[in-house]
Image (cartoon, rainbow, N blue to C red):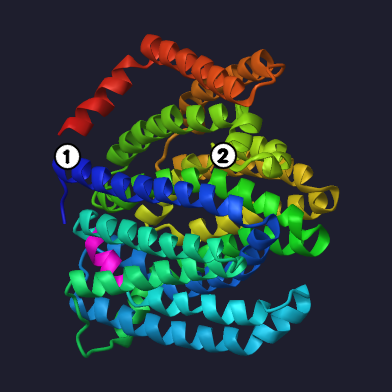
Amino acid sequence: MTYNSKDISKGLFWSAVDKFGFVALQLVLELILARLLLPRDYGVIAIVLVFVTLSLTLTEGGFSNALIQKLNRTEKDFSTVFYFNILAAAIIYLVIFLAAPSVEAFFNIENLATILRVISLSIIFNSSIMVHKAKLSIAMDFRLQAKYSLLSVFLSGGVAVWLAFDGYGVWALVYQNLLMTLFNALFLWIGYRWTPDWVFSFNSLKSLLSFGSKIMISAIIQAVYFNAYPILIGRVLRTADLGLYTKASQFTQMPASVLTNVLQRVLFPFFSSHQNDNDKLFQLNQFYTTVCCLIFFPLFFIMAAVAQPLIIFLFSEVWADMAPVFTLLCMGYAFYPLIVNNMMLFQVKNKTTLFLKIEIITKIIGFAILLLTVKHGILAIGYGILIQQVLQFLITSFFAQTVLNKSLLKQIAIVSPPFLISFAIFVAVHFLVKDVETVAVKLISGSTLALVSYGLIYFLFYRNILSRIIAMAKK
């Protein structure tokens, strides 16, 4: 399947509507829920979501990306993946159901088994629509996904707020997560009328597994790594510390993952259509790396510079202690989109073995850093994440450019100027407003100073790139 610039622009627009709308709704809901619930409630939900996230990774199995990357896919492929996902989800849910009491005993948290059993039903709901989403992504139809996703967030969020007001505590978060997946599944089954054929092909499964299995293993490693944080923090430190870390991580990972997902959902099928042209892929990668730097570095370094007043303004003084770790996570996750962009190239070029090896190496490094820092508190953990993200960016950049037969120095030359500019603005804003006592004044003055600085620098040095981005958006 070939795509033109109109397909890309339209796909980016609706993907952005979906993900930015999701973030906006979630932000409003979190502002309400954070004032009704306690850090401990978020700590409990963080623990159970570890198991849900790992299970979703297992059921997805890399099949979604395998279907998108495969150029000669058939309905037999889609049907085979659908039945395999449903079976895998049912087995995994049964395992979680039986293991739930042991999980509760390990963490010594009352009612954790019941919470885990209820929220894990979302695994089955999600697995039932994985093929629907893959087919829509292949067709560059992100409008339908956006509509149903936002409606699901709105309805489930409304229920969560009502339950929180009524004193249900952590159960408000449980039902929010469960109902969001249920509503989305119902809407997609009703609104996108695809049904699987009564066929299952082991040859098709084997073919897709040759690509998807390594992606799945990599995703499992990544999920285990990220979810090791709440498990170790919850075990070694206080549940309240876990709540602070979870909230800080959520509000740094959310914009990073959402904005990255906006681009990747569209760019992966687009890049895959050029998988045999290294020069074209290199040009595309360089352009979108520049775009990521110009978008993500300002966003995260501005948030880092005004972390304390931003957190107090959004969540109240109760959450003020999360400001230092929030600052470090902002700096670290500024590199996340660049890492994902590099890793996407390995999938596009069908270098899944290399993809998996890099994932293993970088996560071993990250896990070692976590073990060294966890006993020293969440601030030390924040420094560790910053170091790990920078190292992962350098490692993935080196191998990504090697796959395209290009030099790492070209990648560094693109990333270095925006990074140095952002760090300089962060330092300037941080020291200029640190003695301002009023929260609102500190937040507004710091943000304004940073935005004006970025505006002037971009106008002087990046006008051509910005003009190209605007021109693409208008198509």
Reading the image, the residue beneath label 2 is 314
Q: Is residue 285 above or below residue 245?
A: above
Residue at the image position 35 percent from the left and 67 percent from the top: 64
Camera-nearest residue between 144 and 220: 144
Q: Is residue 391 magenta?
A: no
**Tag 1: amino acid:** Ser
Start-end of magenta stretch: 131-137
Q: CB atoms at circles 1 and 2 under 8 Å apart?
A: no
Task: Indicate the quadrant where residue 146 lies.
Answer: bottom left
In the displayed structure image, the side of residue 456 where residue 317 appears, left or right = right
Q: Is residue 132 magenta?
A: yes
Coordinates of residue 402 in the picture (x, y in percent):
47, 42
Coordinates of residue 169 in the picture (x, y in percent):
61, 66
What quarter of the picture does the N terminus occupy?
A: bottom left
Reading the image, the residue beneath label 1 is 5
Residue at the right extreme, as displayed: 375
